[in-house]
């Protein structure tokens, strides 16, 4: 397994020489943090065995939310919070994808466009739930923004995990939706794409941003001149698929929520100035490899660093934190115990004692490496 910190140390000089002017402040901070993550330059924490009382120093992780090493605990906490909100209904995973023609605009105005994508996708689903004959009420949804494809290219899209259910506050009713002839069905994906497109284009104009030339003033998406050869995004893609109880879909989203866009186990080679990583092809489900120069690989990683303070995961409707009491009442009336949802959830890794194999606990953190030297022999 190749460590991302070692790849940064190897190619940082060449990377900065090539991409110096393209880097944003948040990307520079991510680069510096991940370079020192769990290395000899990072602070250390002191762990002690509860059995034999042996003490060892363990390098600190950098804690950056784009680092593949870090924030396993935060990811676990987020997943537990979402699983506790599950309701007795069939769940669907919906994906709202930004057309290629609008990606340059999104790159230039990341905070604004990312926020609009999340809000417009929810507004679209809320409208459909209110107008649906079987639902006719307030829906609930969990939205997560991703900016990368499996190949790590820039590909902004929003994943939404949504139960096929709604609450009618006026009638005090809980409604669920079932497909015809036993088939799973939520909403028509083409209709969703059409409404999402209209809402997002309107929101972009209201923000005062300039749309690509392929759009007319009304945003119809038609060419201004039939002879003019321009790329017009005729098709906006919204994917809808059933995911059962929703647990697996939430685990999938949580995997990339706090731990970067690539796992270090998928970086399989780094030699002769080239880095090779593997990924699963979305269509064939087969593992593929991609080889890039070291600086280009780092750029692929860093272009997915989100603006500071931006919340990529949000809850809406009856799954919003403000609806906690309503959700608890609903689960009680429907005799659903959310605690049982967590029984099969994998626990976080524990620190094992190198002598007796017992569990170790952290007794002191953020010790400078220079101060720790000489106190104890570092572990490993």
Image (tube, grey):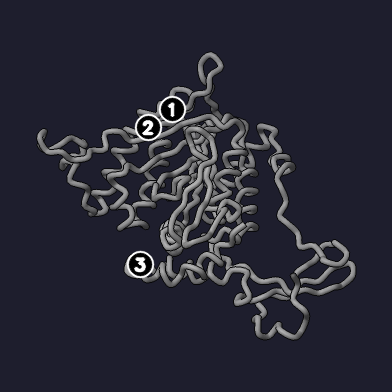
Q: Quadrant of residue 238?
A: top left
Structural crowding at the residue carrying mark 3, measured as other residues with C-alpha within 10 Å and reported as few (<14), some (14–19) or many (≥20) = few
Which residue in the protein does label 2 denote? 192
Structural crowding at the residue carrying mark 1, measured as other residues with C-alpha within 10 Å and reported as few (<14), some (14–19) or many (≥20) = some
Q: Position of residue 258 (x, y in %)?
A: 55, 56
Q: Nearer the viewer, mark 2 or mark 3?
A: 3
Dot 2 or dot 1, earlier in sequence? 1
Which residue in the protein does label 1 denote? 187
Task: Tell which of 98 and 316 is nearer to you.
Answer: 98
Measuring 41% from the left and 67% from the top, which residue is drawn there? 15
Measuring 37% from the left and 71% from the top, which residue is drawn there? 17
Q: Nearer the viewer, mark 1 or mark 3?
A: 3
In the rendered structure, the answer to whether residue 22 lies left or right of residue 32 reads left
Task: Tell which of 257 and 326 is nearer to you.
Answer: 257
Measuring 71% from the left and 82% from the top, which residue is drawn there? 372
Q: Position of residue 176 (x, y in %)?
A: 55, 27
- Check the image and name the residue furthest to the top: 181
Q: Is residue 40 above or below residue 109?
A: below
Q: Are marks 2 and 1 in contact (CB under 8 Å)?
A: yes
Please, what secondary structure does the residue beneath circle 2 have? helix
Tally of numbered tags = 3
Measuring 39% from the left and 50% from the top, which residue is drawn there? 154
Which residue in the protein does label 3 denote? 18
- The quarter of the rendered structure image containing the C terminus is bottom right
Res 366 visible: yes
What's the distance in space between the residues labelled 2 and 1, CA to CA?
A: 7 Å
Q: Are marks 1 and 3 in contact (CB under 8 Å)?
A: no
In the rendered structure, the answer to whether residue 171 lies left or right of residue 206 reads right
- The quarter of the rendered structure image containing the N terminus is bottom right
């Amino acid at each position: 397994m190749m460590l991302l910190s070692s790849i940064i140390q190897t190619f940082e000089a060449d990377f900065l020489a090539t991409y110096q002017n393209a880097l944003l402040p948040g990307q520079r901070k991510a680069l510096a943090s991940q370079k020192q993550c769990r290395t000899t330059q990072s602070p250390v924490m002191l762990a002690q065995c509860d059995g034999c009382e042996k003490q060892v120093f363990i390098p600190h992780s950098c804690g950056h939310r784009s680092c593949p090493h870090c924030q396993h605990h935060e990811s676990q906490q987020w997943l537990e919070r979402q699983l506790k909100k599950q309701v007795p209904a069939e769940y669907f995973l919906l994906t709202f994808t930004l057309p290629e023609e609008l990606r340059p605009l999104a790159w230039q105005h990341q905070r604004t466009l990312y926020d609009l994508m999340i809000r417009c996708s929810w507004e679209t689903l809320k409208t459909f739930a209110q107008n649906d004959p079987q639902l006719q009420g307030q829906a609930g949804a969990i939205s997560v923004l991703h900016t990368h494809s499996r190949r790590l290219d820039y590909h902004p899209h929003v994943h939404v995990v949504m139960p096929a259910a709604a609450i009618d506050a006026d009638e005090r009713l809980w409604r669920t939706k079932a497909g015809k002839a036993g088939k799973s069905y939520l909403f028509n994906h083409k209709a969703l794409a059409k409404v999402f497109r209209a809402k997002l284009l309107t929101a972009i104009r209201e923000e005062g941003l300039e749309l690509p030339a392929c759009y007319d003033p009304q945003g119809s998406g038609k060419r201004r001149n039939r002879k003019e050869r321009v790329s017009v995004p005729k098709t906006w893609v919204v994917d809808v698929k059933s995911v059962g109880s929703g647990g697996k879909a939430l685990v999938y989203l949580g995997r990339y929520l706090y731990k970067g866009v690539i796992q270090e186990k998928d970086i399989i080679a780094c030699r002769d100035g080239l880095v090779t990583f593997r990924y699963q092809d979305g269509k064939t489900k087969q593992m593929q490899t991609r080889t890039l120069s070291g600086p280009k690989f780092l750029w692929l990683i860093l272009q997915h660093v989100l603006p500071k303070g931006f919340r990529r995961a949000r809850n809406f409707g009856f799954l919003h934190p403000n609806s906690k009491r309503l959700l608890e009442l609903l689960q009680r009336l429907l005799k659903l115990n959310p605690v049982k949802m967590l029984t099969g959830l994998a626990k976080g890794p524990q620190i094992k004692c190198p002598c007796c194999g017992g569990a170790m606990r952290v007794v002191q953190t953020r010790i400078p490496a220079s101060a720790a030297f000489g106190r104890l022999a570092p572990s490993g």
